[in-house]
Amino acid sequence: MQPDRDEQVLLERRASIRGRRLRAVGTLTVTSKKLSFRPLARERSITVSLTAIQDIRIVGLLFKKLRISTRRHVYVLYVKGADNLAGLLRTLLAHLT
């Protein structure tokens, strides 16, 4: 993912994503303005603006997953360090408002 001029890449990590009809493995990139998931296969990438995120939760007991809710979609991310990623996203959201 190529960030805009006024964006900084804060985190890039391998992840799996699950949605309603989507299951893919790829790369998760967090910038100062958006969250982007680029699958390894030729599937379409997903980009979510941080302002569109309504809720961030950690789900699961043994294997923690990050659940991100927007107005239209709910994404479940299987990513190493889900707690830390949730904290980063919450901090970014607090600075946007």
Image: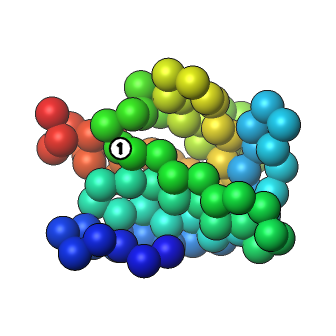
Q: Position of residue 36 (x, y in %)?
A: 52, 59
Which residue is drawn at the image coordinates 47% and 33% (left, top)? 56
In the structure shown, which secondary structural element does the residue marked by tag 1 occupy? helix
Q: Position of residue 64 (x, y in %)?
A: 67, 44
Whether residue 57 is visible: no
Side (left or right) of 40 relative to 67: right
The single residue placed furthest to the top in the displayed view is 71
Q: Amino acid at mark 1?
A: Leu
Q: Residue at x 53, y 29 (%)?
A: 69
Where is residue 28, by image quadrant?
Answer: bottom right
Q: Residues within 10 Å of mark 1 (few under 14, many from 20)?
A: some
Q: Which residue is mark 1?
A: 50
Question: Does residue 10 appear left or right of residue 29 in this picture?
Answer: left
Q: Which sits in the foreground, 8 or 46?
A: 46
Q: Locate residue 79: give its quadrant.
A: bottom right
The answer to whether residue 59 is seen in the rendering is yes
Indicate the position of residue 57 as horizontal and vertical percent values: 52, 31
Query: Considering only vertical position in the picture, is 55 above or below 15?
Result: above
State the residue at coordinates (18%, 41%): 96
Of the 4 image quadrants, the one containing the C terminus is top left
The location of residue 61, given as percent across then percent down, is 72, 36
26 relative to 28 in the view: left or right? right
